[in-house]
Image: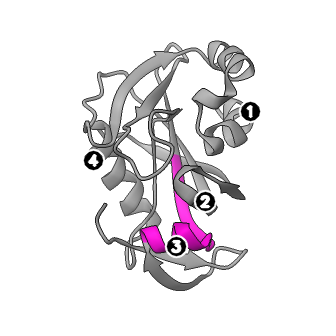
Amino acid sequence: MNQEEIILVDEKDNPIGSGEKLTVHQGGRLHRAFSIFIANSKGDWLLQKRSRKKYHSGGLWTNACCSHPQKGESLDKAVHRRLKEEMGFDCRLKEVFSFVYKAKLDNGLIEHEYDHVFIGRFNGQPVPDPDEAEGWRWIAPEKIRKEIKKSPENYSYWFKKSFEKVADCF
């Protein structure tokens, strides 16, 4: 994992500094993040299966893209940059809500994020970076709901936490 600097924030999303990504997650410090949900014209959602090479939550299903703006980078630039890097496409995105969560993850890491949630529409075929996503699929929200109920361990914490609220936004 590279030594990227991410933005530390207070509970109102005001920047209060920065820190190296892994160190921030080891200490469970509150930082700015984003989650991008993509739907196609049929209403199916694009999910990615996180690469097992990722520093946490590897092999889990999650939303199309999630990441952090880097120190000095605007949220708007970051969401488009990371969507292209992770899934190989870009589209119009709209922020629909934000929330704060804290969760203990695998590898002894703590995710404590001020998460900005974006939605977008895309009808093409993603070309994911294999270091980011080892798989992807289009799936109806009703099927996701059933899968989460049956096997919640197969989905990322933040995806499960935001799923129902995002479903109301499309």
Report, in whole angstroms, how far the alpha carbon at label 2 lies from the one at label 3: 9 Å
Callout 3: helix, strand or loop?
helix
Mark 1 neighbour class, 10 Å CA radius: few under 14, some 14 to 19, many 20 or more: few
**What residue is shown with label 4?**
85
Q: Position of residue 86 (x, y in %)?
A: 32, 43
**What residue is shown with label 1?**
164
Q: Residue furthest bottom?
A: 16
8 inside magenta stretch:
no
Q: Give the residue displayed 44% in from the left and 68% down from the top.
A: 22
Callout 4: helix, strand or loop?
helix
**What residue is shown with label 3?**
24
Circle 1: residue type? Glu
First in sequence: mark 2 vs mark 3: 3
The quadrant the N terminus occupies is bottom left
Report, in whole angstroms, how far the alpha carbon at label 1 lies from the one at label 4: 27 Å
Circle 3: residue type? Val
**What residue is shown with label 2?**
111
Report, in whole angstroms, how far the alpha carbon at label 4 lies from the one at label 3: 22 Å
